[in-house]
């Protein structure tokens, strides 16, 4: 779906090169940009797991590892910002988002995938202490998954939180989807992981959902110069 939206933007731009920023590139999520001229820049936190995954990538023209609040991002530099499963694992997520939006050109696309803190899976992920997460990761994660990564889950890592953020920043949410994609739900012990999520949901009085643990958003920065710009 993201690849299709990028192709549509490329057509709108009359086929000129698109500058793409992948914020959270260490997770290994690659955009489909076949037959489109692009220049892809990757940024992520400097963690051993992410550093190793970034070094294996061959689709990046430039890369940066470090504190995302200090990443060298110039205003209005990118046509597309892709943030795959980044917001739930970083501190000061709204500040990081502000920097990403600031780097986006007017009319550009912010493509977000994130784990929902209000889901049963997100609840288990953020409340499980770090040492059992490291112990269980090799047993529950599917082959090739990068991790375990930090589980911060600030308020913006939820549907209500991201909608409020976009409203305050004058951003337009063009598409909003739910999906199920948690690593443990796709690993060798997926049945046990699903059972645990259903149990957590039941104990919460169904306030924590099992219908989907992922939020996927297509967000557009307005062209109108009267709209609020960061």
Image: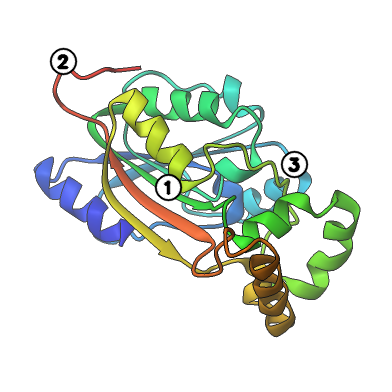
Point out which mark residue 73 bears: none
Nearer to us in this view, 59 or 113: 113
Using the rendered view, name the quadrant where residue 139 is placed: bottom right
Could you say whether the residue bearing mark 2 is in a helix, strand or loop? loop
Q: Is 129 located above or below residue 40 in the figure?
A: below
Q: Quadrant of the N terminus?
A: bottom left
Q: Nearer the viewer, mark 3 or mark 1?
A: 1
Dot 3 or dot 2, earlier in sequence: 3
Percent coordinates x, y for residue 101 in the rendering: 38, 28
Q: Where does label 1 land, which residue?
A: 112
Q: Where does label 3 land, which residue?
A: 47
Q: Is 28 located above or below residue 173 in the figure?
A: below
Q: Is 191 located above or below residue 184 in the figure?
A: below
Nearer to us in this view, 226 or 212: 212
Q: Quadrant of the C terminus?
A: top left
**Residue at 68% in and 55% down:** 123
């Amino acid at each position: 779906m993201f690849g299709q939206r990028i192709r549509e933007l490329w057509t709108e731009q009359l086929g000129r090169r698109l500058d793409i920023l992948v914020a959270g590139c260490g997770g290994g999520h690659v955009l489909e940009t076949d037959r489109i001229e692009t220049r892809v820049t990757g940024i992520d936190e400097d963690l051993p797991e992410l550093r190793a995954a970034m070094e294996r990538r061959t689709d990046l023209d430039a890369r940066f590892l470090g504190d995302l609040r200090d990443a060298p991002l110039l205003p209005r530099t990118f046509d597309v910002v892709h943030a795959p499963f980044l917001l739930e694992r970083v501190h000061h997520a709204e500040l990081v988002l502000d920097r990403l939006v600031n780097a986006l050109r007017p009319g550009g696309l912010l493509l977000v995938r994130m784990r929902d803190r209000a889901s049963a899976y997100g609840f288990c992920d953020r409340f499980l202490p770090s040492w059992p997460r490291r112990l269980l990761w090799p047993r529950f994660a599917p082959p090739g998954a990068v991790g375990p990564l930090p589980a911060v889950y600030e308020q913006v890592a939820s549907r209500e939180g991201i909608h409020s953020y976009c409203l305050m920043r004058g951003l337009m949410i063009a598409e909003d989807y739910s999906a199920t994609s948690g690593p443990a739900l796709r690993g060798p012990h997926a049945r046990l992981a699903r059972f645990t999520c259903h149990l957590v949901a039941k104990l919460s009085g169904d306030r924590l959902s099992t219908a989907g643990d992922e939020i996927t958003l297509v967000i557009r920065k307005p062209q109108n110069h009267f709209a609020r710009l960061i």
